[in-house]
Image (cartoon, rainbow, N blue to C red):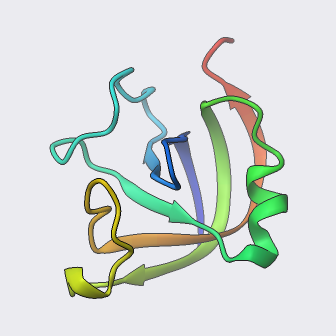
């Protein structure tokens, strides 16, 4: 799957993709704002996260969608990333919000 979206890099792997039609709110993502959690397996981290130099970027993300309905099986962090996740394998066409 290929997705054009804003990426907001959070703390401790809380990285979320938002609709590309408008930059996300400057505040940390909340449960109210529609988002998809982006994560990478170790073999893809350098290609995805290594290409990103800012905390907020607009990019084209390639990966695989996963639906993880059971909260207990999702990664435990400060907040629940939700059941829809994109396993990123590549990012291209990066553009910062400072255009």
Residue 96 appears left or right of 47: left
Count every numbered label the image shows and give the total.
Answer: 0
The residue located at (30%, 54%) in the rendering is 78
**Vertical side of 10 occupied by 65: above or below:** below
Q: Quadrant of the C terminus?
A: top right
Residue 51 appears left or right of 69: right
Q: Quadrant of the N terminus?
A: bottom right
The residue located at (52%, 61%) in the rendering is 38
Residue 20 appears left or right of 97: left
Residue 43 appears left or right of 62: right
- Quarter residue 80 falls in: bottom left
Horizontal and vertical percent position of residue 87:
57, 73
Furthest residue toward top: 99
Furthest residue toward left: 32
- Quarter residue 71 falls in: bottom left
The residue located at (62%, 36%) in the rendering is 58
**Vertical side of 42 occupied by 55: above or below:** above
Horizontal and vertical percent position of residue 67:
34, 83
**Vertical side of 93 occupied by 3: above or below:** below
């Amino acid at each position: 799957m290929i997705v054009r979206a804003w990426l907001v890099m959070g703390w401790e792997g809380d990285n979320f993709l938002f609709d590309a039609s408008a930059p996300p709110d400057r505040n940390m993502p909340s449960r109210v704002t529609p988002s998809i959690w982006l994560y990478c397996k170790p073999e893809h981290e350098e290609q995805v996260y290594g290409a990103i130099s800012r905390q907020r970027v607009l990019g084209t993300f390639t990966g695989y969608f996963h639906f993880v309905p059971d909260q207990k099986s999702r990664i435990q962090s400060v907040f629940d990333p939700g059941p829809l996740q994109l396993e990123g394998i590549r990012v291209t066409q990066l553009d910062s919000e400072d255009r």
